[in-house]
Image (tube, helix red, strand yellow):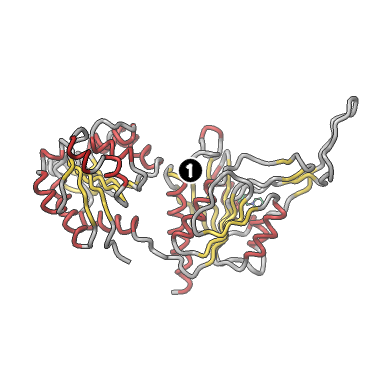
Amino acid sequence: MSLRGKSVLLIIGGGIAAYKSLELVRRLRERGVRVRAILTRAGAEFVTALSVSSLTGEKTWQDLFSLTDEAEMGHIQLSRAADLLVVAPATADLMAKLAQGHASDLASTALLATDKPILLAPAMNVRMWNHAATQRNLARLTADGVISIGPNEGEMACGEFGPGRMAEPEEIVEAIETLLVRKATLAGRKALVTAGPTREPLDPVRYLANRSSGKQGYAIAAALAEAGADTTLVSGPVDLAPPPNVTLLKVETGCEMLDVCESVLPADVAVFAAAVADWRPESRADGKLKKRDGDAAPLIRLARNPDILATISRSKNRPALVIGFAAETENVVANGEEKRRRKGCDWIVANDVSAESGVMGGDSNRVHLISAAGVEDWPLMDKREVSRRLVERIGAALKRPAE
Ligand code: C5P
């Protein structure tokens, strides 16, 4: 698969590394990528619109309030017509604007108006890069789902040494390729994912449930399908759109979820992200439980629900790779490791769901990947980015025994 026919909107910020962006345009064009460029006012101090246009073969956009530009192609259309937005060099100023959601010039407006992925190639003085404000902005952007490459470490144009050099054009092209060309690393593999809460009925109208949104599990199913896996998502009741190219099987209770999961096996990989209720009401009334004046409040007796992760980890149909989740409010890693052993799965993705973490129902997640090989701490990321990384790791792990 190649980049031919893809389209990139390149935003060239103001930094000496802007000259490398000309080389980036050349390499993208060689691979058949259509490149449109926005040159910021500061960027135009380093390279000219004429040199950019000579290489892109298109006009270079510079002004948010240009009547002719807007008439030809409005800034919203400009940012949406591309498959990907690349900011190279991404200056401290552009990163700050994007982190704050400014729309004060054409570049920041295009970045805010897009519904496409954004790749940043930061380049700046090492002290600017290390400054708390830049690092804060980077963390915010990563949590928003913005992807970044570099900066690299080395001798800088200003004479200092350290991280701050823009990634090389070829490295940026490779990052673009990873983002735009779907690598079918899991083609021919079968995946099972559970997601969402379960509902355990007391009677026909009442149930016990929990606050799981299902977002992480849905994002994992989407990422597995994107990587080419034949993916089945067994989901409790949630308010989310079905991910593309995924077989969605909706269930209500934990017992139903186990039955449906067992019917989907065999699979190569199973990811259990559902928040299955630990207990269910021991009995379910056929009719609505009635309250009568003077009656004592009824007691609800609970029964243990089956543990789907533990059951499938020990079943004869066990997938080659079984991944569980551990939502913890304290001792996240120690409890995750204990859970991995107790449930017999291969990996545990452990996360902090204490109220202050904002993970429950939110779009970001900070996780630890726990395996027999040890623990990896991942930074705070968008749940989709957590999923993409997890799927990359699944691809690598499933490849190993077959090699
Ligand atoms: O024990 P705990 O609920 O914290 O374990 C979480 C992990 O176990 C998750 O991967 C969850 O999907 C799975 N689980 C399950 N069936 C249950 C309870 C948890 O599959 N009844």
- Establish whether ligand 1 lies closer than 8 Å to the Cβ of label 1: no
Side of 49 relative to 259 (left or right): left
Task: State the residue in front, 333 or 152.
Answer: 152
Give me the residue at 21% from left, 47% from top: 166
Give me the residue at 23% from left, 51% from top: 167
Task: State the residue in front, 254 or 59.
Answer: 59
User: What is the x, y in percent for residue 186?
Assistant: 46, 65
Give me the residue at 61% from left, 68% from top: 266
> Farthest residue in the right direction?
294
Side of 117 relative to 220 (left or right): left
User: What is the x, y in percent for residue 319?
Assistant: 58, 66
Q: Quadrant of residue 290?
A: top right
Q: Which residue is mark 1?
A: 365
Q: Quadrant of the C terminus?
A: bottom left
Judged from the image, the secondary structure of the residue bearing numbered disc 1 is strand
Q: Quadrant of the N terminus?
A: bottom left
Task: State the residue in front, 117 or 106.
Answer: 106
Looking at the rendered structure, the kind of residue marked 1 is: Asn
Q: How many marks?
A: 1
Task: State the residue in front, 402 or 332.
Answer: 402
User: What is the x, y in percent for residue 300?
Assistant: 81, 39
Give me the residue at 33% from left, 39% from top: 113
